[in-house]
Amino acid sequence: MNLKAVKDAGQTLIYDTKSHGKEITDRMNQLSNVWEALQELAASRGQKLNESITFQKFLAKIEEEEAW
C-alpha cells in the first residue's frame, strides 16, 4: 500500500465513521512528516553517493596517469 492509498483510506474512514477524526488526522500528519523526513534522508544519501562516484572516478584517473 502506498502513501496516497493510506491517506485515502484515512479520509474515507473519517468520512464513514464520523469518529476518531482528530486521531486519524493526527496520525496521517505524522505519517506525512515521517515520509518527508525519509525522502530528505534518501536525497541526502543519493547526493553523497554521487559525490563518492565522482571521487572514485577522479582517483581512477590519477592512478591511470601515475601508471604512465
Image (cartoon, helix red, strand yellow):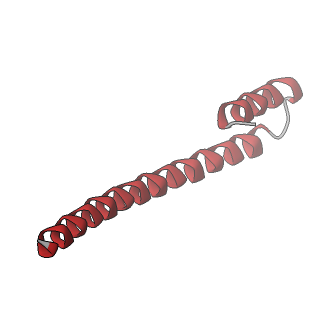
| 54 to the left or right of 25 | left
State the image coordinates of residue 52 (x, y, percent, origin top left): 33, 64
Nearer to me, 44 or 51: 51
Question: How many labels sit on residues?
Answer: 0
| Residue at the extreme front of the image, as rendered | 68
Residue depicted at x 68% and y 46%: 26
Is residue 64 placed above or below 35 in the rendered structure?
below
Q: Quadrant of the N terminus?
A: top right
| 60 to the left or right of 24 | left
Q: Quadrant of the C terminus?
A: bottom left
Residue depicted at x 80% and y 24%: 15
Quadrant in the rendering for residue 49:
bottom left
Quadrant in the rendering for residue 28:
top right
| 10 to the left or right of 34 | right
Is residue 36 placed above or below 48 in the rendered structure?
above
Nearer to me, 35 or 55: 55
State the image coordinates of residue 3 (x, y, percent, origin top left): 66, 37
Nearer to me, 16 or 63: 63
